[in-house]
Amino acid sequence: MKSKRISWREIKRQKFLMICTVCFVIYGIIFYYLPLGGWIMAFQNYKAKDGFFGSQFVGLDKFKFLFSDATFLQVIRNTLAMGVLNLVCTFVMAIVFAILLNEVRLMAGKKLVQTVSYLPHFLSWIIVTGILHDALSSSGIINELLVKVGILDSPINFFAHKGYFWPIVAFANVWKETGWNAIVYLAAITSIDPSLYEAATIDGAGRWAKIKNITLPGIKPTIIILLIMNVGNVLNAGFEVQYLLGNGLIKSVADTIDIYTLTWGVGQNDYSLGTAAGIFKSVVAIILIVAANQIAKKTGEEKLF
């Protein structure tokens, strides 16, 4: 079968699409690929006054320092733990929410719930963390409810106990992103052939049986693809929520790689060390995505590439 060649007439006919494509390609090159040249700082003892060409090359010294620094190893643990917790909670809750929402028969109620669930996504983390801080403070509504129902004898400061911080971060991500993440699954559910549900109803299948045997298998390819993509974001556990809710008492469990990069790259003016930490995170993300994709490929599931 011969490949179809694109003629100049076809290009002229789709001139607008070609212009849009070129614009996006240029945008990607400028903002995504050209900045990669800054990675050279990770292999230099970079000084702003000397620039890229005047700074001394130190090879892998910055990376050796990173992996010999107990603080960096600690932030890797924090980032990985919160990243996995966020991935599991937000991923599972989005699927569950989409399936439950699909089971709602009252259209007015369904649209209302959809709209309300989307709204937190458009709130900035400043607002979200402010709400969390007020709700979980010693005089907040959570402490008042727990004391009134007898679970607590007296109010506690949730942000003074290390054991509460990771669940708080996971809850914040679930509350903020579940409704938005569920959009893709709702779209996948609507693409399932309605005749399958009709046939299942005739066979006497209940709602749970339909979910188990029709809905979940129908959205399985979408679940696999999004899981592969999200695995690469495990080390993107966040910056704003940890930075805004963290304090000196829980610093050992709150700091992430992004905060570490900010502390050294901007706070200590060590741009080389901050760049090295960023490169480490990017390389790990690429490895995780490729590994997840290969596992999906070998098990016969949908793959990303």
Image: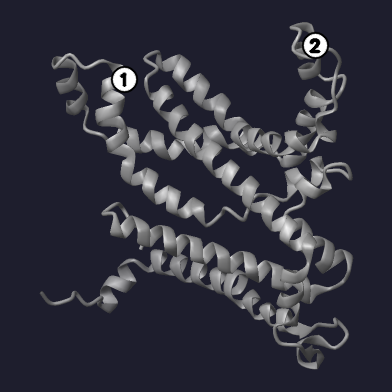
Location of residue 10 (image quadrant): bottom left
> What residue is shown with label 2?
147
Residue 130 is marked as: none
Nearer to us of marks 1 and 2 is 2
User: Residue shown at 47%/28% (left/top)?
Assistant: 97
Instruction: Give the side of residue 12 with respect to residue 152, left or right.
Output: left
Say what amino acid the circle numbered 1 marks. Trp
Say what amino acid the circle numbered 2 marks. Val
> What residue is shown with label 1?
208
For label 2, the SS is: helix
For label 1, the SS is: helix
Does label 1 or label 2 sit earlier along the sequence?
Answer: 2
User: Residue shown at 50%/26% (left/top)?
Assistant: 114
Q: Position of residue 64 (x, y in %)?
A: 72, 77
User: Residue shown at 19%/74% (left/top)?
Assistant: 4
Q: Residue furthest left?
A: 1
* Colouring convention used in this rendered image of the protein: one colour
Q: Is residue 165 visible?
A: yes
Classify the position of the N terminus by image quarter: bottom left
Q: Is residue 191 visible?
A: no
Q: Position of residue 201 (x, y in %)?
A: 19, 16
Q: Position of residue 127 (x, y in %)?
A: 76, 35
Q: Please tell me whether residue 270 is drawn above or below residue 50 in the rendered image.
A: above
Classify the position of the C terminus by image quarter: bottom left
User: Residue shown at 72%/51% (left/top)?
Assistant: 239
